[in-house]
Amino acid sequence: MGLKGSRSEKVKIIVCDSGPVIHLHEAGILPLLQKIGEVFLPQRVQLEVSSIINLGKDWPEWLQVIHLSRDELKEAKMWTKIGDLHEGEAEAFVLARSLKVDWLLTDDSSARFFASNMGLEVHGSLGIVLWNVVHKYLSRKEGINALRSLRKTSLWLSVNIFKEAERAIEEMGLRNKRLK
């Protein structure tokens, strides 16, 4: 079931909160997530995503839904109380720890802060686009277009962050031209 990343990159194991799935879908670039590795969602996140976007029968099979155990659900409830996390974020956090993932994906700043303080590597929708450019799944132009599509979604990021991301993609393109 493993997907291949770039030749030198191992397949990542990823747990995703609802935000990146929703934002990448709204931008029409959800398949970029699949290029990185195996993607898991707790059932609560699937329910949150399904309440906002209707994927119905088109739910990608590579977005693997995991049902948490009773003990894991108890732990998630605890994190909602003491970690100031929503239920989906808490379940994603518990699943990420359980699976010993490479990345936890969330676009929520407090969830990102919480997860990184607990030792998880955290990325968001913007990072998915940048990763795909770095690993040459997207050209410079495609990466810029993907960023612009992402900017039109419900994802909130400052203008400066988007400009920095565009600048980073431009610089990657220039570096790649010099290496040829």
Image (tube, helix red, strand yellow):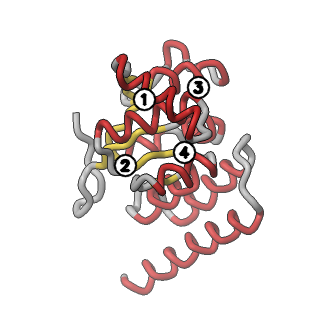
- Left or right: 11, with 24 as reference point: left
Q: Residue 166 carries which label?
A: none
Which of labels 3 and 4 is toward the front? 4
Q: Which of marks 1 and 4 is nearer the N terminus?
A: 1
Which of labels 3 and 1 is toward the front? 1
Query: Which of 51/148 is in front?
Result: 51
Q: Which of marks 3 and 4 is nearer the N terminus?
A: 3
User: Crowding at label 3, few (<14), some or many (≥20) Cα neighbours within 10 Å?
Assistant: some
The residue beneath circle 3 is 49
Q: Is mark 1 on a helix, strand or loop?
A: helix
Q: In this rendering, is residue 71 above or below 93?
A: above
The residue beneath circle 1 is 75
Q: Earlier in the sequence, mark 2 or mark 1?
A: 2
Q: Which residue is drawn at 27% across and 49% down?
A: 11
Q: Which of marks 4 and 2 is nearer the N terminus?
A: 2
- Left or right: 74, with 170 as reference point: left
Query: Which of 45/11 is in front?
Result: 45
- Residue 23 percent coordinates (x, y): 63, 40
Whether the residues at callouts 2 and 1 have beta carbons within 8 Å, the answer is no
Label 2 and label 3: CA atoms lie apart by: 20 Å
The residue beneath circle 4 is 106
The residue beneath circle 2 is 36
Q: Is mark 3 on a helix, strand or loop?
A: helix
Q: In this rendering, is residue 167 above or below 145?
A: below
Whether the residues at callouts 4 and 2 have beta carbons within 8 Å, the answer is no
Q: Earlier in the sequence, mark 2 or mark 3?
A: 2
User: Crowding at label 2, few (<14), some or many (≥20) Cα neighbours within 10 Å?
Assistant: many
